[in-house]
Image: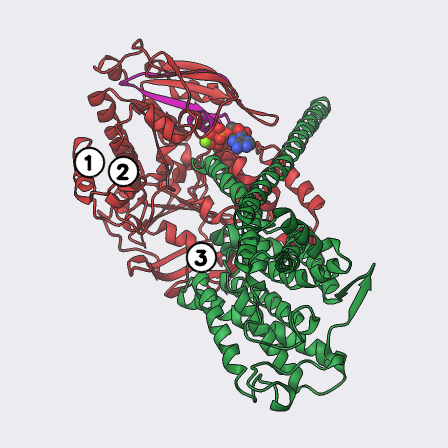
Chain colours: A red, B green
């Protein structure tokens, strides 16, 4: 997007607001950041790209004082500063917009914004300020809404407002869109554009999505193995060369599929006569607050088939994932695996029946951050590495080692604590575990969130291979490209109900779009 | 190809080696730090206590000599300290179990009292050979403690009552129940013939249903101490290496993942509370039948704060089973040592303050470490991407 270069507020030559010089951070033998230089200029959005484990998050944590570098310095308008903790970072005008953790769910929006303030609390002032900010930047929100009622996109708005209220000079975002729907992402980028243009603020943005980096940023820095391998202006970049610079080899990109229409190599067999490995019939469920999560949802998945569940975020995908993780009980309807009814909401029942799942929120139900990588590989069936009830640590480490190799997980070893892994590598651990258990059904919910382009390519291959091996795969994704790329059959979910179905070979994008937004209801819904 | 393979293994091995070394270094660093922290905290507490004693007109050297004499130096005192440490250790073991499951039980004192009451009630009514009655009474004590903690567990999972509150409230209830039972002859009160008038005590256990005592190097203590240490070792293995321990830890750190992996929150959570209370109940039974706490009978205020001491010991040991054995001994020593303080002419209240200061000194380092670790973990995970 070349027009950004000419817009007032900043250009490639303006002196940086924040400059990182020679930043190095080691963790034992791992060099997370290796002599990194980075200049973030006012009025510009600076994209940071890199493979999983390249050191992007570590670099951002240096900026906001969560990580103290071993060497190098941070300069603000040319003078060296020390950032020892987030409070110091805030004093220096650097704020981070956190993903999904720092909000207190039972509290309202304005209460959350006021949280962490010192001194007397003045609800009226805080409320007014929230209104002001939301108006200024087009971040519409009701200050009296309860956080627990808000979808991911709105929660992020609260985080942004929280951050903007301190009037920072530099805003740091680490994979902000991994929890957002495409529409919400677009909204976010519009708001960011306003922020940088109007007030000359600077933004550092980490993302794995080349498309949005190309569209939303002004300059790009690419990291690999802790080092900066390329810095360029977005105007000179194209997705293919970015991907190559990140991964160090050619990769095929998702976007290609739609453009070339190569999706039609999905052969479709008529399987209606076969017994499905997973059959969900008339599933209905309500949340604790009585909201309808699933509404007579029915879907079949056959052995060897990849079924893509398309839909706008927040239409019941999460509830479906929870049901198939045994976290949520159905009010009515049934789930069958190979014709056997599986009780819902009973701990471990789905896992025992052979339903593997890569959950949408891995920190909630996919892994234990305080456990080691090896322990995380065996949380569902420690029996496999145990004798007479006692776990065999050596055996566990050996097997974990094999999975680490096979899935190319970058970590210090099987004993490394899960929290020390980069986000993408945590996701790989979850994938490795679920695929290594010989599942009958694999539910992959937003499986590529947080994965780099190389890893996405690899994951797609793994999913296809699993399907070829006879696993029935239910792919839940809000990214249409991903669904089109992988699925044999596509079902569309809206308001907790399946509103349409089609095979990938004769997919009609326009119709899917209409179904997803609820603009068209379908009569031929399978029941 | 094979060439590549071998180089990559050696690099991996090298890397693993470096990581292991770094970890070893940091572990040593932490140990030195922990010891340093303790030295500092205990020194400060000792100094403060000394000043306090001196200001109130006592002799602080006499106080410290008395503490050491009373707990370990004088002949036979180690045995006494072991006897006192035994129930403290058992309570701590239970505390570690519920801690692993992510539950907070602070009502061990009440569970201990219930255990003692159940055991006393059973012992007074069971017929049969002494050792048999003893064993059964102790097991019934376990049941008593487990039930008392189990109530809190059930309230937590079926009625959403925080277990911190319910366990504490149930402690008050337990104390009152014992007081009431000690007024009814059909419950706990000893028959009038066996006691001084108006004394509210239970019938002392007969000689053959008391826990045998052994003498090692001039130190006499009940064999329940050995049982407690064996239980600690078993528990260390179960929590550290078994599937059950693994699942319990999972529940304590991430209930969502645990549920998905087949750890039913209610089942494991309530079981953890039952085990926790069971340990406290056993502690109560051992106090009753061990001989280091009164005359083998229930009296008013029987718990004597041992439940709270055990809770503190578990906190000081930072929930680690083998360390808690040592910490329980230190806590036992604080009690037996304080027994000698009276003889120095220091007033009872001052003696209590001295003891409190020392407990605080023991608690402070783990608290500091905990806060710092939490902060580090937060830093590592707060931008979890
Ligand atoms: N606290 C830590 N302890 C040990 N190793 C760590 C720690 N934090 C990060 N690392 C390691 O440093 C490297 C860089 O991690 P970082 O989180 O910065 O990657 P990233 O670029 O954000 O990757 P992703 O795209 O997967 O989020 C990884 O190999 C990771 O395992
Ligand atoms: Mg990251």
Image disc number at residue A157: 2
In the image, residue A438 sits, relative to residue B202, either above or below, namely: above
In which chain is the residue bearing label 3?
A
Report if the CB atoms under discs 2 and 1 are less than 8 Å apart.
Answer: yes
Alpha carbons under labels 2 and 3: distance apart: 28 Å
| Residue A237 point in image, percent of width and height | 37, 16
Image-quadrant location for residue A135 = top left
Residue range highlighted in magenta: A33-60
Pair 3/1: label in front: 1
B333 or A64, which is in the foreground?
A: B333
Q: Estimate the spatial distance between the alpha carbons at disc 2 and disc 1, rounded to whole Å.
A: 9 Å
Chain identity of mark 1: A
Q: Quadrant of residue A238?
A: top left
Say which of A317 and B314 sits in front: B314
User: Could you tell me which chain the residue with mark 2 belongs to?
Assistant: A
Residue at the disc numbered 3: A327
Image coordinates for residue B62, horizontal then vertical, percent:
65, 50
Q: Does label 3 point to a residue whose CB lies under 8 Å from ligand 1?
A: no
According to the picture, the residue beneath numbered tag 1 turns out to be: A134
A283 lies above or below A248: below
Expressed as whole percent of the image width and height from the top left, the position of residue B280 reads 59, 66
Q: Residue furthest right?
A: B217
Single out the residue that lies furthest toward the top: A13
Which is closer to the viewer, label 2 or label 3?
Answer: 2
Q: Are marks 2 and 1 on the same chain?
A: yes
Q: Residue at x 39, y 38 (%)?
A: A484
As drawn, which residue projects farthest toward the bottom?
B193
A155 lies above or below A338: above
* Lower position in the chain sequence, tag 2 or tag 3: 2
Disc 3 and disc 1: Cα gap in Å? 35 Å
């Amino acid at each position: 997007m070349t027009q950004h270069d000419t817009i007032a507020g900043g250009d490639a030559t303006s002196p940086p607001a924040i400059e990182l010089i020679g930043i190095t951070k080691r963790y034992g033998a791992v060099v997370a950041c290796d002599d990194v230089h980075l200049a973030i200029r006012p009025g510009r959005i600076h994209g940071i790209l890199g493979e999983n484990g390249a050191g992007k998050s570590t670099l951002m944590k240096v900026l906001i004082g969560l990580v103290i570098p071993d060497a190098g310095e941070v300069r603000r308008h040319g003078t060296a500063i020390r950032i020892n903790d987030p409070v110091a970072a805030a004093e220096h005008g650097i704020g981070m917009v956190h993903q999904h953790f720092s909000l207190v769910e039972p509290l309202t929006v304005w209460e959350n914004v006021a949280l962490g303030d010192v001194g007397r609390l003045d609800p009226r002032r805080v409320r007014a300020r929230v209104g002001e900010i939301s108006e200024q930047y087009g971040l519409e929100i009701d200050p009296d809404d309860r956080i627990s009622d808000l979808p991911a996109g709105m929660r992020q708005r609260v985080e942004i407002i929280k951050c903007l209220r301190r009037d920072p000079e530099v805003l740091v975002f680490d994979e902000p869109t991994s929890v957002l729907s495409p529409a919400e992402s677009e909204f976010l980028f519009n708001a960011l554009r306003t922020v940088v243009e109007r007030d000359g603020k600077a933004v550092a943005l980490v993302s794995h999505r080349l498309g949005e980096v190309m569209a939303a940023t002004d300059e790009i820095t690419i990291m690999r193995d802790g080092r900066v391998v390329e810095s360029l202006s977005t105007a000179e970049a194209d997705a293919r060369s970015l991907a190559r610079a990140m991964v160090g080899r050619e990769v095929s990109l998702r976007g290609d599929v739609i453009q070339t229409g190569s999706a039609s190599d999905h052969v479709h067999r008529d399987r209606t006569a076969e017994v499905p490995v997973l059959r969900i019939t008339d599933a209905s469920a309500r949340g604790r607050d009585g909201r309808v999560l699933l509404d007579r949802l029915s879907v079949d998945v056959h052995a060897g088939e990849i079924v893509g569940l398309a839909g706008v975020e927040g239409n019941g995908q999460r509830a479906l994932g929870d049901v198939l993780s045994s976290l949520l009980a159905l009010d009515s309807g049934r789930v069958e695996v190979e014709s056997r009814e599986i009780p819902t909401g009973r701990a471990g029942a789905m896992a025992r029946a052979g339903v593997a799942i890569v959950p949408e929120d891995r920190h909630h139900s996919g892994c234990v951050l305080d456990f080691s990588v090896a322990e995380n590989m065996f949380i569902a069936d420690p029996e496999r590495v145990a004798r007479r009830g006692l776990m065999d640590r050596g055996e566990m480490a050996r097997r974990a080692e094999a999975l680490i190799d096979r899935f190319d997980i970058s970590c210090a070893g099987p004993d490394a604590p899960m929290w020390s892994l980069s986000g993408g590598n945590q996701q790989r651990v979850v994938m490795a575990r679920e695929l290594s258990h010989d599942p009958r059904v694999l539910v992959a919910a937003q499986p590529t969130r947080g994965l780099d382009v190389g890893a996405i390519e690899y994951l797609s291959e793994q999913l296809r291979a699993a399907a070829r091996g006879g696993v029935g795969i239910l792919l839940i994704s809000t990214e249409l490209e991903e669904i089109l790329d992988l699925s044999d059959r596509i079902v569309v979910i809206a308001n907790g109900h399946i509103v349409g179905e089609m095979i990938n070979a004769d997919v009609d994008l326009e119709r899917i779009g209409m179904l997803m937004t609820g603009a068209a209801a379908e009569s031929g819904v399978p029941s | 190809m094979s060439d590549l393979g071998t180089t990559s293994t050696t690099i991996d091995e090298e890397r693993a080696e470096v990581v292991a070394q770094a970890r070893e270094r940091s572990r040593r660093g932490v140990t030195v730090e922990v010891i340093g922290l303790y030295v500092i905290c205990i020194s400060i507490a000792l100094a403060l206590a000394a000043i306090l004693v001196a200001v109130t007109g006592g002799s602080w050297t006499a106080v410290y000599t008395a503490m050491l004499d009373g707990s370990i130096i004088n002949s036979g005192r180690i045995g006494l300290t072991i006897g006192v440490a035994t129930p403290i250790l058992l309570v701590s073991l239970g505390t570690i179990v519920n801690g692993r499951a992510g539950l907070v039980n602070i009502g061990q004192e009440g569970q201990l009292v219930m255990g003692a009451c159940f055991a006393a009630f059973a012992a007074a009514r069971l017929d049969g050979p002494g050792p048999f009655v003893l064993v059964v009474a102790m097991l019934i004590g376990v049941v008593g403690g487990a039930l008392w903690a189990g109530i809190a567990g059930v309230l937590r999972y079926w009625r959403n009552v925080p277990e911190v509150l319910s366990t504490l409230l149930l402690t008050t209830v337990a104390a009152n129940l014992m007081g009431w039972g000690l007024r009814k002859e059909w419950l706990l009160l000893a028959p009038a013939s066996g006691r001084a008038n108006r004394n509210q005590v239970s019938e002392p256990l007969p000689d053959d249903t008391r826990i045998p005592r052994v003498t090692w190097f001039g130190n006499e203590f009940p064999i329940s101490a050995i049982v407690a240490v064996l239980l600690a070792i078993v528990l260390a293995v179960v929590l550290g290496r078994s599937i059950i321990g693994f699942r319990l830890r999972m529940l304590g750190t991430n209930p969502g993942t645990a549920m998905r992996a087949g750890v039913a929150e209610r089942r494991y959570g309530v079981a953890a509370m039952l085990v926790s209370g069971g340990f406290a109940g056993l502690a109560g039974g051992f106090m009753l039948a061990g001989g280091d706490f009164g005359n083998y009978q229930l009296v008013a205020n029987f718990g004597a704060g041992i439940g709270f001491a055990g809770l503190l010991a578990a906190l000081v040991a930072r929930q680690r089973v083998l360390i808690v054995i040592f910490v329980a001994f230190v806590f036992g020593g604080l009690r037996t040592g304080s027994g000698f303080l009276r003889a120095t002419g220091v007033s009872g209240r001052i003696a209590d303050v001295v003891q409190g200061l020392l407990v605080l000194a023991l608690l402070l380092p783990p608290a500091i470490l905990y806060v710092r670790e939490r902060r580090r973990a937060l830093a590592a995970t707060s931008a979890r991407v």
